[in-house]
Amino acid sequence: MSRMGIWGAVEGFFRRQKSEDRSAANPDFADLLGMTTPMERAWLWRYGRRQFTGKGAVVDLGCWLGSTTIPLVDGLRGNANFRRLGLPVHVYDSFVWESWMDRVVVGTELAGRFQPGDSFQCEFALRAKAYASELEVHAGDLAAIGWCGGAIEFLLVDAMKSWELARATLRLFYPHLIPGTSVVFHQDFCHYYTYWIHLLQFRLRKWFAFQEDVPSSSSTAFRNTGRIPSELLNREWAKADFSSAEVEEAFAYSLEFVRVENREAVQAAKIMCLADLGFIDLARTELDGARAMGCNQYDMQMVGALPGLGAAAR
């Protein structure tokens, strides 16, 4: 992920933190350190407590310091289906500190503790120690680690930070989804940088149904409705596979179900997509149209600063 994309994610997270209703968390996990909002944490807790059926495993791709893992597992603890299943929650992360993470921990006990390249797995273990017996931790590159745990009922995806990771996620984890049961929770769906999620979700729309756009967050959940053909999951998806016309269709599809508060971020992702796929004139037209409509939130500001789109490029 580029420096611009990382900083955009960090700034967007802090803006959402300021604007959301913290009282919505049930229970309140607002004190957890991480780049998730209380509304996301509450959603994960409720899913674990009330919706998990025990038909497959629970997988968290990109757990960082545990702000998704902890509420999810806490909710599952009170679910008889999870207790009866007797399987751990599988959590994946590289657990390697990167420089952009410093911004998230400013003013906390972690400020200055880790340098780029350091492992922070010990910190995750410390924060999630109350749930250690219910976790199986996979440290490293998820594409290399893979999956051999059978059917997956709940797949939390906060690791599609590149085309490479997106392809690996589809190839390794999606074949194990349970039609009619499994939920895929995309934590970066409403963020300008990870535009490929929209393109791939559109291509796979026949096998998914929209479930919920989580308020005050960038997360959106989908339910798997059918067995996805293996040739689609194993395909080496690339930028060249998508025309400008399909980009238009894909983002129109996404905009149909996201909340009003998230539409500008999705529109910004469309502009990012057009620019990255080489349709720079179309990206400029979209950006000009968005600005004329008064769109100027952080996602739009970030794409407006992209090479070829900023004022200096005009």
Image: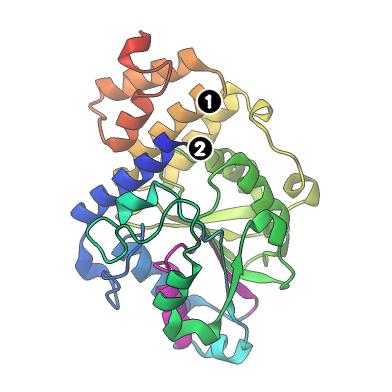
Q: Is residue 235 left or right of residue 166?
A: right
Q: Is residue 219 visible?
A: yes
- For label 1, the residue is 276
Q: Nearer the viewer, mark 1 or mark 2?
A: 1
**CA–CA distance between discs 1 and 2?**
9 Å
Indicate the amino acid at tag 1.
Answer: Asp
Q: Is residue 5 left or right of residue 243?
A: left
Q: For this rendering, which residue is in front, 24 or 252?
A: 24
Q: For this rendering, which residue is in front, 25 or 221?
A: 25
Magenta extent = 55-77
C-beta proximity under 8 Å, tags 1 and 2: yes
Q: Position of residue 110 (x, y in %)?
A: 32, 63
Q: For this rendering, which residue is in front, 231 or 106?
A: 106
Question: How many numbered marks appear?
Answer: 2
Indicate the amino acid at tag 2.
Answer: Tyr
Q: Is residue 51 left or right of residue 301?
A: right
Dot 1: within a 10 Å radius of its alpha carbon, few (fewer than 14), some, or many (20 or more) residues? Answer: some
- For label 2, the residue is 195
Dot 2: within a 10 Å radius of its alpha carbon, few (fewer than 14), some, or many (20 or more) residues? Answer: many
Task: Tell me the quarter of the image containing the C terminus.
Answer: top left
Q: Measuring 68% from the left and 29% from the top, which residue is drawn there?
A: 241
Q: Measuring 24% from the left and 48% from the top, which residue is drawn there?
A: 15
